[in-house]
Every structure is written in structure tokens, then in C-alpha cells.
Amino acid sequence: MFDVGGVLLDWDPRHLYRKLIPDPLEMEWFLAIVCTWLWHDPHDRGAVTAQSCAVLTRRWPAYAGLIWAWCERGEEMVAGPLDDGVALLRQLVDSGLACYALTNMEAETYPKRRRRYEFLSWFAGRVVSGFEGVAKPDPQIYEVLLGRFDLDSETTLFIDDREANVVAAARVGMEAYLYIGPEPVLARLGLVKG
């Protein structure tokens, strides 16, 4: 079971906002005070980004253009694939293992990324938080994936770049790895190339 952002895709709002706010300190202020992680979190749970941008621009009218960029230029937050993660996915799929995606992502964004990145079609199944109304690390989303694809938690390996998500997966009975590269995963599965 793969996370997408941080394992397969290099997603970070800074990739977009470095283009729009030349001063790094001002950019960090904007992301800490205006378009915050707390503000973004509901998008991963199904809130429509355009609606939340409209609400936020009423609170911060001087930053309206920058706020709307979150919605209108969101694909620029993806710098591209993370080659090691994609190679790991390819190797596991080629070995015959069924691989699944469990990602926190907006409902309106996932179809764009699936069209843009062919490797997102390699999964046997996927659960995208924006369509489910629940996001990692809520235990419910792990249960959704396990139930939907009839997976046994004890024989499911979960890979994510965020410790809170790994801890939550372990709590529902999965073997869970904090992703730091492909080698520990390949070693665990006995697929290390010699």
C-alpha cells in the first residue's frame, strides 16, 4: 500500500509559491499564516478548493491572487515524480505483488494527476481521501482500503513519508514503514537486487 505524495510525487506548495513570492521569508509567512496546512486539510477530506479560496480571499483580500493560485495553479505544486519511489512501485508490480494507493489528495486534483503520471494507473486499486471524506491518519481510511479490496491487515505492508500516517497504519494492524527510500522495503520483501 503506497502513499503518493512524498513517496511517488514531489508535492510541496513551495514549488508554486517560490515562483509567485520571490522573498523566501515572505513566502514562508504566507504559507504559515494565510494558506496554512490547517486551511488546506479540509481539501483532502472533500472540501472544494475553489470554495475555500473564495472564503479565504474575503479574509485576506490583499492576497487574493496568491490564494487563487492554490486552486488555479495547483499542478505547479508537483515538481515531478520521485524516481526511487516510482522504480520501487514498478519493481513490486513486475514481481507480481498487488499494489494499492492510499493518498490524501483533493477529489478535483487526483484525476488530473492520474492523467499526467502514467504510473498512477499501475495500482490494483486506490483510495483517495477527497472522494472518501476522511484522510490519513484517521483509522477509518485504512479500514476503507482494507475492506474495499478485501485485504488482510496482517499481510499488508504500508509505505508513507509521514510518521503519523505510519503509526496509524500500524494501529490498525498493518506492517508500516516510514519511507526513506526503496531499500528497506525491498529487503523486507526479499527483493533486493544482488
Image: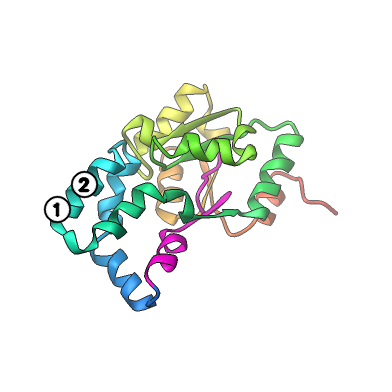
Taking the spot 52% from the left edge, 23% from the top edge, the residue there is 149
User: What's the residue type where badge 2 is placed?
Assistant: Ala
The residue that disc 1 covers is: 58
- The span shown in magenta is 1-21
Taking the spot 23% from the left edge, 65% from the top edge, the residue there is 33
Could you tell whether 21 is left or right of 150 in the image? left
Q: Give the answer, above or below, for where 57 lies relative to 128.
A: below
Q: Give the answer, above or below, for where 148 lies relative to 130.
A: above
Residue 137 pos. (x, y %): 37, 45
Q: Give the answer, above or below, for where 19 lies relative to 5.
A: below
Answer few, some or many: residues within 10 Å of disc 1's Cα (few below 14, many 20 plus, some between 14 and 19): few
Residue 68 pos. (x, y %): 30, 52
Residue 187 pos. (x, y %): 71, 51
Give the camera-side residue of 30 and 4: 30
Taking the spot 24% from the left edge, 62% from the top edge, the residue there is 63
The residue that disc 2 covers is: 54
Q: Is residue 64 magenta?
A: no
The answer to whether residue 156 of the structure is visible from this angle is no
Find the distance from the CA under tag 1 to the CA under tag 2.
7 Å
Circle 1/circle 2 CB separation < 8 Å: yes
The answer to whether residue 62 of the structure is visible from this angle is yes
Badge 2 element: helix
Give the camera-side residue of 20 and 138: 20
